[in-house]
């Protein structure tokens, strides 16, 4: 089913998903940007949008910039800020479910996609609101060209661990950790609090989880059935979180959430970047680093 729409002077068409989820948004890039062949910088779950605007102001107009979020009021305000700074030809904020729309939305952009960032999603306890999961990772693996970067950050280590592991497991070898992790200061990845229980469990459990995730990632879930009670019990929390409505992010296979968090792949050896590699903080980052002096767990990936 297809419907059309116009929001302000921007035109969009909507393809309804057969599974009844939010519509997938197809943007008319030629209307949105003056030159839609410019390399695109994307922030998924952009919130109020100051990071995207700061990127445009600092990096300049050789790029286009796109902020995506589900909250229309924030996006309308951010588009107003872009207009007030005469940035509308290069900066746009779009309301969409990043998970459901990434493949169609980003796959239709005429130019190259330079950077996709996912920063400070809700913490692990509310992981059903996460953007990063199998669906998004597979979409980005499809639409990004070699050399494109993916930047992940959170002030919760388990949330960053979860995102990193999702790219390592579901990226199917199409992403790697950027070399900046060998040239800039890093600090070691620890075991998040929620993983502490897993250390007490035998290595048999770990290898089972690894095989289970790999099989699920390759689509061969025929013999796996639901995750075992033992493996789900390895990490705190269950995939059924009464706090979550599941209205926003649909991180992916809820059955493998805990396994994914516990997955111990090789990327953890790269450590977390001490400093922000893209040079511009989000609102949350300013709050965490300046107001609370808290730590941020960052990783920069590149499409192989
Ligand atoms: C904790 S805020 C972080 C905002 C911003 N990235 C920052 O660092 O300041 C998380 C944001 O992700 C958005 N979000 C959650 N699920 C989303 C989805 N599936 N698609 C798009 N945005 C989503 C929320 O609306 C919210 O603005």
Image (cartoon, rainbow, N blue to C red):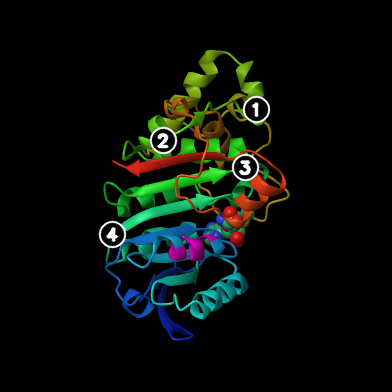
4 and 1 marks in contact (CB < 8 Å): no
Q: Which badge, 1 or 3, comes first in the chain's sequence? A: 3
Residue range (magenta): 51-57
Separation (CA) of disc 1 from disc 2 = 22 Å
Q: Where does residue 240 sit, x and y in percent of width and height?
A: 66, 43
Q: What residue sits right under mark 4 in the picture?
A: 112
Q: Does any atom of ligand 1 lie closer than 8 Å to the CB of label 1?
A: no
Q: Which badge, 3 or 4, comes first in the chain's sequence? A: 4
Q: Which badge, 2 or 4, comes first in the chain's sequence? A: 4
- Image quadrant assignment for residue 159: top right
Q: What residue sits right under mark 2 in the picture?
A: 168
Q: Which badge, 1 or 2, comes first in the chain's sequence? A: 2
Residue 251 belongs to the span the image colors magenta: no
- Image quadrant assignment for residue 237: top right
Q: Where does residue 14 sit, x and y in percent of width and height?
A: 42, 74
Q: Does any atom of ligand 1 lie closer than 8 Å to the CB of label 4?
A: no
Separation (CA) of disc 3 from disc 4 = 30 Å
Q: Nearer the viewer, residue 194 or 233?
A: 194
Q: What residue sits right under mark 1 in the picture?
A: 233
Q: Secondary structure at mark 3?
A: loop
Q: Where does residue 150 sit, x and y in percent of width and height?
A: 41, 47
Q: Secondary structure at mark 1?
A: loop
Q: Nearer the viewer, mark 1 or mark 2?
A: 2
């Amino acid at each position: 089913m297809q419907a059309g729409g116009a929001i302000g002077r921007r035109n969009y068409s909507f393809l309804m998903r057969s599974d009844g989820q939010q519509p997938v948004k197809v943007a008319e890039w030629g209307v949105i940007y003056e030159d839609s062949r410019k390399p695109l910088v994307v922030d998924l779950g952009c919130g109020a949008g100051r990071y995207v605007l700061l990127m445009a102001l600092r990096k300049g107009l050789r790029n286009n910039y796109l902020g995506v979020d589900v909250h229309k009021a924030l996006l309308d305000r951010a588009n107003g800020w872009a207009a007030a700074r005469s940035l509308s030809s290069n900066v746009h904020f779009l309301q969409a479910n990043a998970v459901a729309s990434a493949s169609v939305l980003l796959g239709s952009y005429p130019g190259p996609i330079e950077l996709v960032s996912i920063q400070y999603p809700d913490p692990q306890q509310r992981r059903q609101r996460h953007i990063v999961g199998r669906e998004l990772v597979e979409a980005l693996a499809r639409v990004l060209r070699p050399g494109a970067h993916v930047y992940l950050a959170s002030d919760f280590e388990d949330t960053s661990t979860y995102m990193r592991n999702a790219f390592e497991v579901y990226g199917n070898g199409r992403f790697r950790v950027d070399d900046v992790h060998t040239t800039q200061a890093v600090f070691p990845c620890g075991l998040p609090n929620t993983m502490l229980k897993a250390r007490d469990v035998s290595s048999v459990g770990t290898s089972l989880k690894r095989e289970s995730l790999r099989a699920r990632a390759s689509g061969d879930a025929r013999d796996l059935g639901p995750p075992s009670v033992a493996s789900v019990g390895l990490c705190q929390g269950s995939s059924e979180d009464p706090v979550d409505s599941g209205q926003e992010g649909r991180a992916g296979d809820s059955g493998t959430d805990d396994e994914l968090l516990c997955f111990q792949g090789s990327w953890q050896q790269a450590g977390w970047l001490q400093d922000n590699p893209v040079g511009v903080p989000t609102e949350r980052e300013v709050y965490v680093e300046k107001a609370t002096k808290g730590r941020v767990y960052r990783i920069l990936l590149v499409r192989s």
